Image (spheres, rainbow, N blue to C red):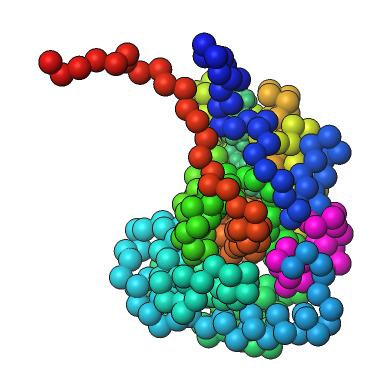
């Protein structure tokens, strides 16, 4: 924090509490994360992503009847809208998948019959439709880049199994579906992170839900935020491709020394709020370990541990969720640029919960700035 003549400046709003929220509690002291009071680890182990989506939106876990209604609506909304597909097909395959995601969210919004209705009832319905629609967009965008056609959704599969089905055109093994589900729950919500705060700023002007989500997708793309899971995989690929003998730990250490010497941020490490490690990492790492076992990639386990240990020794900075999430998605077969769109598909739940909460007691978000430009001067 720096001081001007009379004002304190909080760069990046670090440490600044701007509002209350009932949706999640990120606690760096206890290194914990609660969704509506429930530890995220318990939810990831015992509940479905559909149940967690309901919890974030409504504040309570669903009854069997409520879950059945949500599930039916989500499954009914999975098909790729032909107009969305047409727009996606107009975008070059050189466009980043996050730009495709952002564009698709905009098109879905422009076509939603309730776009201009920001009542809670309409926003709940829009949130569900957008949440249901995104997997088909992410899956199709990856397939079109591979020269493959879209795969129709299946109503007999749950959210995670269907997402994998649409992405790869085959039924994923149960342990792969479970690992994907865990990642969706862990990525769903994290209080006032940059993309969620972006959504709240946009909502505070009384702009609509899809405008707020489109802005949030833009914010999430950055490598300091959601784009880090993609960047982690680029780091792994750089190290795996580096020469310097077979010992991965030696290669990881020399890669890190060089990166730090060049003042590079090491993607997947550090966090603005957590300072003693990200509470979600152990759960995501356990899923990564299961995928390493499933696909027989012990080399990734060695690389993961070597870089983590070298970063701990060099900077005493611990991994965040993106560090185990990136290689997990890689092992599942997703193209690296698709990793952050997977984060989008999950975080739509958290973003839309915050959009609705912002509207409950709205105040236009408009901070001050301290002017340090030229003194007043005149043309003649
Ligand atoms: C997400 O906010 C959320 O909740 C986000 C998220 C969510 O669920 O929504 O958790 C998801 O975005 C996780 C973060 C993903 N980003 C990355 O992995 C990118 C790499 N991380 C860093 O850029 C950094 O750790 C940030 C941006 C995440 C947080 O940085 P801060 O709190 O602004 O701290 P800082 O950048 O001021 O760093 C403090 C010091 C600096 O050293 P000095 O310049 O003071 O000597 O620590 C260093 C930094 O250089 N540092 C790092 C580092 N992280 C901090 N140095 C190298 N590599 C890093 N990763």
Q: Is residue 177 within the magenta segment?
A: no
For residue 188, above or below residue 113: above
The percent position of residue 107, horizontal first and vertical second, equals 41, 70
- Magenta residues span 35-57
Give residue 50's quadrant in the image.
Answer: bottom right
Q: Is residue 284 visible?
A: no
| 349 relative to 133 in the view: left or right | right
Q: Residue at x 72, y 84 (%)?
A: 69
Residue situated furthest top in the rendering: 5
| 377 relative to 327 in the view: left or right | left
The percent position of residue 104, horizontal first and vertical second, equals 43, 68
Q: Which residue is drawn at 63% across and 69% down?
A: 120
**Nearer to us in this view, 374 or 272:** 374
The percent position of residue 222, horizontal first and vertical second, equals 50, 45
Q: Can residue 63 be seen in this view?
A: yes
Residue situated furthest left in the rendering: 380
**Nearer to us in this view, 97 or 54:** 54
| 215 relative to 379 in the view: left or right | right
- Taken as a whole, is the magenta stretch helix, strand or loop? helix
**Nearer to us in this view, 314 or 88:** 88
**Nearer to us in this view, 135 or 67:** 67
Give residue 126's quadrant in the image.
Answer: bottom right
For residue 185, above or below residue 162: above
Q: Residue at x 42, y 66 (%)?
A: 106
On-image quarter of the C terminus: top left
| 185 relative to 223 in the view: left or right | right
Q: Residue at x 62, y 45 (%)?
A: 193
For residue 14, above or below residue 185: above
On-image quarter of the N terminus: top right
The percent position of residue 376, horizontal first and vertical second, equals 29, 16
Q: Is residue 42 within the magenta segment?
A: yes
Ligand 1 lies in which image quarter?
A: top right
């Amino acid at each position: 924090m720096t001081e001007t003549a009379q004002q304190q400046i909080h760069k990046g709003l670090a440490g600044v509490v701007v509002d209350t929220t009932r949706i999640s509690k990120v606690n760096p002291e206890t290194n914990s994360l609660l969704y509506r009071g429930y530890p995220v680890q318990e939810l990831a182990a015992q509940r479905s992503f559909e149940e967690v989506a309901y919890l974030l939106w409504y504040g309570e876990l669903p009854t069997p009847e409520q879950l059945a209604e949500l599930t039916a609506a989500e499954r009914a909304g999975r098909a790729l809208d032909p107009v969305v597909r047409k727009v996606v097909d107009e975008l070059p395959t050189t466009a980043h998948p996050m730009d495709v995601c952002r564009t698709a969210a905009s098109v879905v919004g422009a076509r939603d019959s309730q776009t201009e209705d920001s009542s809670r009832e309409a926003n709940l319905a829009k949130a569900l439709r957008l949440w249901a629609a995104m997997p088909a967009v992410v899956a199709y965008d990856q397939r079109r880049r591979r020269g493959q056609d879209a795969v129709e959704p299946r109503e007999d599969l749950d959210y995670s199994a269907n997402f994998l089905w649409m992405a790869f055109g085959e039924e994923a093994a149960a342990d792969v579906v479970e690992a994907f589900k865990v990642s969706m729950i862990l990525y769903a919500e994290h209080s006032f992170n940059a993309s969620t705060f972006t959504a709240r700023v946009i909502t505070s002007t009384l702009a609509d839900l899809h405008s707020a989500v489109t802005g949030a997708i833009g914010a999430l793309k950055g490598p300091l935020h959601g784009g880090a899971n993609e960047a982690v995989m680029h780091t792994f690929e750089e190290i795996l491709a580096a020469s310097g003998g077979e010992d991965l730990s030696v290669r990881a250490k020399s890669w890190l020394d060089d990166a730090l010497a060049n003042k590079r941020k090491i993607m997947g490490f550090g966090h603005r709020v957590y300072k003693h490690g990200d509470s979600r990492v152990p759960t995501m790492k356990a899923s990564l370990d299961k995928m390493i076992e499933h696909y027989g990639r012990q080399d990734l386990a060695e690389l993961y541990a070597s870089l983590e240990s070298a970063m701990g020794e060099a900077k005493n900075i611990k991994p965040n969720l993106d560090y185990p999430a990136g290689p997990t998605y890689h092992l599942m077969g997703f193209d690296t640029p698709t990793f952050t769109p997977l984060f989008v598909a999950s975080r739509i739940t958290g973003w839309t919960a915050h959009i609705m909460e912002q509207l409950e007691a709205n105040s236009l978000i408009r901070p001050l700035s301290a002017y340090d430009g030229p003194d007043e001067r005149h043309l003649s």
